[in-house]
Amino acid sequence: MLDLQSLTVGYRNTRGAVLSGIDVSAAPGDFVCILGRNGSGKSTLMRTIAGLQAALDGAALLDGEDIASMRPATRARRIAVVLTERQFNPGLRVDDVIALARQPFTGWQGGLADDDRGAIADAVAVTGVEPFLRRFFSDLSDGERQRVMIARALAQTPHLMILDEITAFLDLPSRVEIMAMLRDQAREKEQIVLLSSHDLDLSLQLADSVWLLDDAGGFSVGTPDELSRSGALGGAFDSGAIRFSPERGRFEIGTAESLAGETPDS
């Protein structure tokens, strides 16, 4: 179980708190999409949950243990993180990058056991990266690199996966495939998956639960249907260019008048 208890995230400078007093939980098997406009605090929240950034107040607990207080080796065995920034030695091949996921589980010599090889093989199979396993990571396209990083996260066999905009460079069929696969993995492996995305319609179709951030520091939680009916989705995203339709359950492009900056009569 992931529990956020009175969690406040932000920066200890003039920016201060970005999100305050968050109380929410996620259970094994949950596929959670974190949605919000740019600057709403999605990445700050995810980095704090991952233990990469100190909370201003409160705590994020995984199975009852404060993530921020975990030893690095313990955290690496239980949490897989894929952020927007990815830095690897240009001399590493794709199979090397994925195999590094097993480092927290190997002995001091770093040798892979049968369990490690099995976890790597499963991750390679479900993400479809086998055709470029022997290529250098630095030679891949952005979309291929993202697939590799997802494979690496899966090979880590974590309790919790935190994935920040991991479908940004994928085409539409690949985004659908990857997000559906992650949802299925969460259920089959009883993992918790937190995924931030700007692909709003797809997230609303696939998510078990949505954590919704708005520009005013608001934080709403519910199923896509609950947030649709409550008006929270519209409150977070509606503008002259796009509006959420609760009746149709999707985002729609604004009228010509609204795109030009005029307010429609309706």
Image: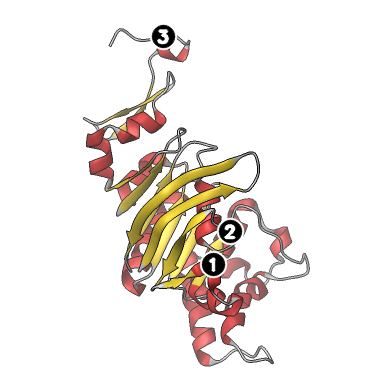
Q: What residue does disc 1 label?
A: 68
Mark 1 in CB contact with mark 2 (< 8 angstroms): yes
Tag 1: residue type?
Answer: Ala
Q: Say whether residue 170 is visible.
A: no
**Type of the residue with mark 2:** Ala
What amino acid is found at the position of numbered circle 3 in the picture?
Answer: Glu
Q: Residue 54 carries which label?
A: 2
Q: Which of 25 and 241 is in front in this view?
A: 25
Mark whose residue sits in front, 2 or 3: 2
Residue 107 location in percent, x, y? Answer: 63, 92
Bin the neighbour count of mark 1 within 10 Å (Cα to Cα): few under 14, some 14-19, many 20 and up.
Answer: many
Label for residue 187?
none
- Could you say whether the residue bearing mark 1 is in a helix, strand or loop? helix
- Give the residue at x 77% y 64%: 90
Q: Where is residue 129 drawn, in percent x and y?
A: 55, 66
Along the line of sight, which residue is nearer the eye, 96 or 216?
216
Q: Can you say whether 117 is above or below 13 in the image?
A: below
Which of the marked residues, 2 or 3, is nearer the chain's N terminus? Answer: 2
Quadrant housing the C terminus: top left
At 39% from the left edge and 59% from the top edge, which residue is drawn?
A: 5
Label 3 sits on residue: 257
Q: Quadrant of the N terminus?
A: bottom left
User: Does 14 sit left or right of 209 as displayed?
Assistant: right
Q: Residue, x 31% and y 35% (percent of image)?
A: 232
Foreground tag (1 vs 3): 1
The crowd level at tag 2 (other Cα within 10 Å; few <14, some 14-19, many 20+) is: some
